[in-house]
Amino acid sequence: MGELVNSEPDLGTIKPSFTSSSEPENSQSKSLIEALSLDPHIEGGYFRQTDTNPTTIPSPYSSEALSHETLTLSGPAREGYRADTRRLSTTIYYLLTPRHSQGNFHRNRSRVIHTLHRGRGRYVLIHPNGCIESFIVGNAVERGERIQWIVEGDVWKASYLLPNEPDTSHEPNREETGGLLISETVVPGFEYHDHAFLTQEGIRELLKEEQARELDWLVRRSE
């Protein structure tokens, strides 16, 4: 289970291991990005859509977009988009690297199933009732790390890269970390109309002042 935090949480373990920068990616990350044909993602990191279920269903959601900010960042609606239908499912690769090391707090209307391929990272979730959940994803399942995890619709989600090994005795080496690579399957399928970023005002409404201050670095800064 994740670390469920209900009151007076100690969020000291939730802090960045890497600092995102505009410097070129290291050789491992660059090779992976090129091999998988990944593009920058508006949440942070990189992605590529790998599957779209051809079946469509009536949309269970409002026809109104969840966030006009997201629509501005994502650009024109995809070809064939209709507000009254959704694809049954969609799947992407998603990658965090030492240079692009965090995915900022956001939510989707749809359920998201995550599967680990390589690397380590920490996820931080804020549930609609204000409960904070945090867990590490990685291959050390005997230490409680997860290789599969599910985030329900309307849960705020952020993630960030961790070193390959949980050794905190020295600064992680950017050049030795290839990144965190996962797949995400969204059901019903992903649409930018169903996506929104958490704002600095929003996190203060959801959480206690101290909690909001500790997690503020995972909130996207408006440009």
Image (tube, helix red, strand yellow):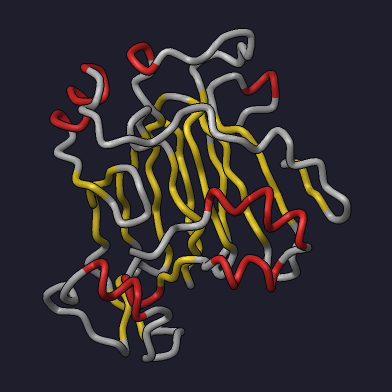
Residue 177: quarter of image = top left
Image point (47%, 67%), residue name:
108
Left or right? Give the position of 41 relative to 13.
left
Query: As displayed, is residue 106 above or below residue 102?
Result: below
Image point (69%, 27%), residue name:
144
Query: As displayed, is residue 142 above or below residue 94?
Result: above
Which x, y percent locates residue 150?
56, 51
Q: Nearer the viewer, residue 163 or 34?
A: 163
Left or right? Give the position of 190 relative to 62.
left
Image point (44%, 24%), residue name:
119
Image point (31%, 59%), residue name:
90
Residue that extends furthest to the right in the rendered view of this protein: 8
Q: How many marks?
A: 0
Residue that extends furthest to the top in the rendered view of this protein: 169
Assign the C terminus to one quadrant of the image. Answer: bottom left
Q: Nearer the viewer, residue 37 or 24?
A: 24
Left or right? Give the position of 65 relative to 150.
left
Which x, y percent locates residue 83?
29, 87
Which x, y percent locates residue 127?
68, 63
Which x, y percent locates residue 184?
40, 49
Query: As displayed, is residue 88 above or below residue 219?
Result: below
Residue 153: quarter of image = bottom right
Q: Nearer the viewer, residue 12 or 47?
A: 12
Assign the N terminus to one quadrant of the image. Answer: top right
